[in-house]
Amino acid sequence: MRRWVHAALLAALVLTASKLPALAAAPPEADEAEPVVPALLVIDIQNAYLPRMDQSETDGALRVINGAIWLFRQYGRPVIRVHHTDPQWGPGVESEEFRFPESVNVTEDDPQVVKSHPCAFVDTELDALLEDLGVNTVFLCGLSATGCVLATYFGALERDYGVFMIEDALMSPKARHTEAVTEILDSVSGRAMETVLKAAAE
């Protein structure tokens, strides 16, 4: 079950505070868990929404997001683009506002999911896509930490995925809200994320 993957991965990540190599070790109850198979969800970093975020954190977050994209590519793991549009208010899927800025290192070859609800799993093909890819754990980055990223986090939990937000790779209209979300919910550093990817590749 995916919930056991989440429990095993969370327990391993907690160990990074004292000894990072211990991340690969599973707790006793995780012996029967399936291997971690991760994907990266890059959520809503669109020209329509990026200017609405707290600009004190956007440059740093974009650098960390690009680092995460690079890291997932190095380990051959999926990078999935998530875009938001509203049937009434847009932005239109062909518009420049719908696109990610060129500074975000996604490509047209990366799978794309278009949503019209805060949660990327609602009325989209995301769950089926992840199942086809064999993914059972998702790492989230993008915007906003208090909106669509948060809704997708809980949507993943409800579907028994292991799910983690990436520290310093999130944005919100107010930076203090981003900090609060990452403190309350499961979030991981880039270093811990790399260790998970390395362990998954072995």
Image: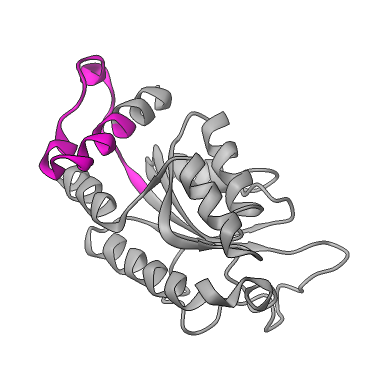
User: From this viewpoint, which residue is outermost toward the front?
Assistant: 176
Instruction: Reply yes or no: does residue 122 show up in magenta.
Output: no
Which is nearer the eye, 187 or 149?
A: 187
Which is nearer the eye, 152 or 93?
A: 152
- Residue in the picture at 57% in, 30% down: 158
Residue 44 seen anywhere in this rendered image of the structure:
yes
Instruction: Reply yes or no: does residue 14 show up in magenta.
Output: yes
- Residue in the picture at 13% in, 41% down: 19
User: From this viewpoint, which residue is outermost toward the right?
Assistant: 88
Residue 106 seen anywhere in this rendered image of the structure:
no
Relative height, residue 140 to residue 69 (above, below) = above
Query: Where in the figure is residue 109, as x and y percent of width and height?
Result: 43, 70
**In this rendering, would 7 be left or right of 93?**
left
**In this rendering, would 136 be left or right of 11?**
right
The image quadrant where one finds the N terminus is: top left
The image quadrant where one finds the C terminus is: top left
Query: Where in the figure is residue 166, as x and y percent of width and height?
Result: 41, 54
- Residue in the picture at 29% in, 29% down: 11
Q: Main secondary structure of the magenta part?
A: helix
- Residue in the picture at 39% in, 41% down: 135
Residue numbers of the magenta segment:
9-38
Residue 8 occupies quadrant: top left
